[in-house]
Amino acid sequence: MAEFLESKDLSKSKADEIREYVEKILPFEAEFAVKSAADKRVKLKEPRKKKIQCDKGHWVTIDDHPVYICD
């Protein structure tokens, strides 16, 4: 990794900052994976298909989520 960072014309201080971040974050990720109550099998499932209750409508985005609006 060090060679890659330094080959990208980063300053030594910036490369060191990135290296330190990666060294710090990896243990946190491992700890979270152990402590997380999330069922990792759920991520592999296909999303449920909802039946639309109206014949005509359109999609809009609200708070970065797609929402179907019946006309």
Image (tube, helix red, strand yellow):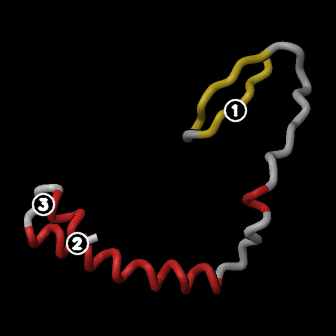
Q: Secondary structure at mark 2?
A: helix
Mark closest to the chain's N terminus, 3 or 2: 2
Tell me the quarter of the picture where residue 61 sits: top right
Q: Nearer the viewer, mark 2 or mark 1?
A: 2
Above/below status of 35 relative to 39: below
Q: Which residue is mark 1?
A: 67
Q: Which residue: 72% across, 78% down? A: 37
| Residue 54 relative to residue 32: left or right | right
Q: Which residue: 26% across, 79% down? A: 20
Q: Position of residue 19 (x, y in %)?
A: 26, 75
The residue type indicated by label 2 comes to Ala
Q: Secondary structure at mark 3?
A: loop
* Image disc number at residue 2: 2
Mark closest to the chain's N terminus, 1 or 3: 3
- Specify few, some or many for label 2: CA neighbours under 10 Å numbering under 14, 14-19, or 20 or more: few
Q: Nearer the viewer, mark 3 or mark 2?
A: 2
Q: Are marks 1 and 3 in contact (CB under 8 Å)?
A: no
* Image disc number at residue 10: 3
